[in-house]
Amino acid sequence: MKANYMLKVEDARAVDIQKALQAAGIKVRSIQEIHKEGEAQPAVPGTSGTGAAGAHQPQEKK
């Protein structure tokens, strides 16, 4: 049987989660981080770290 689950953790890395599940006899196909709470880190130095929502928008000509 194949199933998808969403898991919320504190103080854990994907590799730690995978090892724990495999130790319990659970075959892991993939682990993907979809959201990280906490202080955002800028993707590019000198940017605000707002991602696509903060991407450059052309200004309207007056």
Image (cartoon, grey):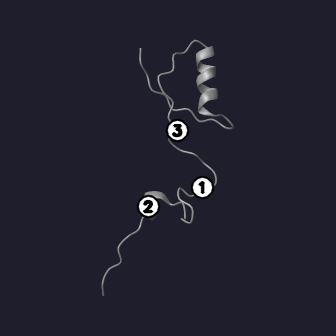
Residues at marks 3 and 2, CA–CA distance in whole angstroms = 19 Å
Residue positioned 47% across, 58% down in the render: 51
Within the image, what quadrant is residue 46 found in? Answer: bottom right
Q: Earlier in the sequence, mark 1 or mark 3?
A: 3
Percent of width and height locating residue 28: 51, 21
Residues at marks 2 and 1, CA–CA distance in whole angstroms = 15 Å
Q: Establish if 29 lies above or below 52.
A: above
Residue bearing the label numbered 3: 33
Taking the view exactly as shown, the residue that stands out farthest to the right is 11
Q: Amino acid at mark 3?
A: Glu
Residue bearing the label numbered 2: 53
Q: Quadrant of the N terminus?
A: top left
Residue positioned 53% across, 59% down in the render: 44
Query: Quick check: 11 left or right of 47?
Result: right
Query: Quick check: 22 left or right of 61?
Result: right
Of circles 2 and 1, which is in front?
A: 1
Taking the view exactly as shown, the residue that stands out farthest to the top is 25
Q: Quadrant of the C terminus?
A: bottom left
Residue positioned 53% across, 44% down in the render: 35
Residue bearing the label numbered 1: 41
Within the image, what quadrant is residue 61 found in? Answer: bottom left
Q: Earlier in the sequence, mark 2 or mark 1?
A: 1
Question: Which element is circle 3 on?
Answer: loop
Percent of width and height locating residue 49: 54, 60
Q: Are marks 3 and 2 in contact (CB under 8 Å)?
A: no
Taking the view exactly as shown, the residue that stands out farthest to the front is 45
Q: Earlier in the sequence, mark 3 or mark 2?
A: 3
